[in-house]
Amino acid sequence: MHTRLSATEKRFAGIQITQSLLSLRVYKNAKSICSYVSTNSEVDTHQIIREALLAKGSIIVPKIQGMNLELYSIRAFEELIIGAYGILEPHVRRAHVPIQSIDLFIIPGIAFGKDGTRLGHGKGYYDRLLQSTHVPTIALAYDHQIFDTIPHGAKDKKVDIIITETHIYDLINPSISSV
């Protein structure tokens, strides 16, 4: 959080993180993936979304609706337009995708604990969304966003896997975590 990466460092780290994600069995086996669409301050998911579109034909992305996230399937990156908080979100009004049909979530955050704790952007969108599912959740982060633990409340949802440019913290199968 206190370390700023240059554009080149962010790009390199993003490539490392993307390669790690795409190599995970839980990612490869997921039929229906929901990913956040990154802003400039977050690990870039644009390439991940494009890869999923090529490999799987579609990907689910969130759209802010009031105090909640609604989920929509897209079939092309160009279906995204700038929405709430300057975040790209689907503009096509297709049927909302039920959370029960999703196999894997890729979620954002500001800081993460090595124990899976997560500090989001403060509005609780993902904590509310993920309360009704138990599928794997993966957070993408830069090394400087990782701490031993971070403050969290009872309603804060922990993540199962955290991927940085140098580590994979697998809290489901700690024996395969890379350090």
Image (tube, rainbow, N blue to C red):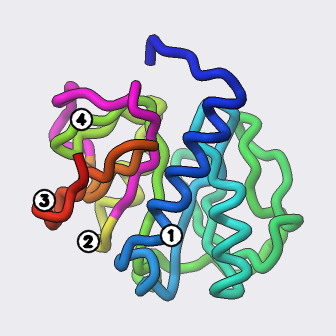
Q: Residues within 10 Å of mark 2 (few under 14, many from 20)?
A: few
From the image, tell me which residue sits under label 1: 22
- Mark 2 and mark 3 residues within 8 Å of each other at the beta carbon: no
At a point 62% along the width and 41% down the height, the residue shown is 12
Q: How far apart are the two marked residues, 4 and 1, measured between alpha carbons?
A: 22 Å
From the image, tell me which residue sits under label 4: 113
Q: How far apart are the two marked residues, 2 and 3, measured between alpha carbons?
A: 18 Å
Q: Tell me which label, 4 or 1, sits earlier in the chain.
A: 1
Q: Nearer the viewer, mark 1 or mark 2?
A: 1
Q: Is residue 92 above or below residue 177?
A: below
From the image, tell me which residue sits under label 3: 174
Q: Tell me which label, 1 or 2, sits earlier in the chain.
A: 1
Q: What amino acid type should be assigned to the residue bearing mark 2?
A: His
Q: Position of residue 135 (x, y in %)?
A: 31, 73
Q: Which residues are magenta?
A: 137-156
Q: Tell me which label, 4 or 2, sits earlier in the chain.
A: 4
Q: Is residue 115 above or below residue 107?
A: above
Query: Which image quadrant: the C terminus?
Result: top left
Q: Residue furthest right?
A: 78
From the image, tell me which residue sits under label 2: 134
Q: What amino acid type should be assigned to the residue bearing mark 3?
A: Pro
Q: Is residue 20 magenta?
A: no
Q: Tell me which label, 4 or 3, sits earlier in the chain.
A: 4
Give the side of residue 153 with respect to residue 105, left or right: left
Q: What amino acid type should be assigned to the residue bearing mark 4?
A: Gly
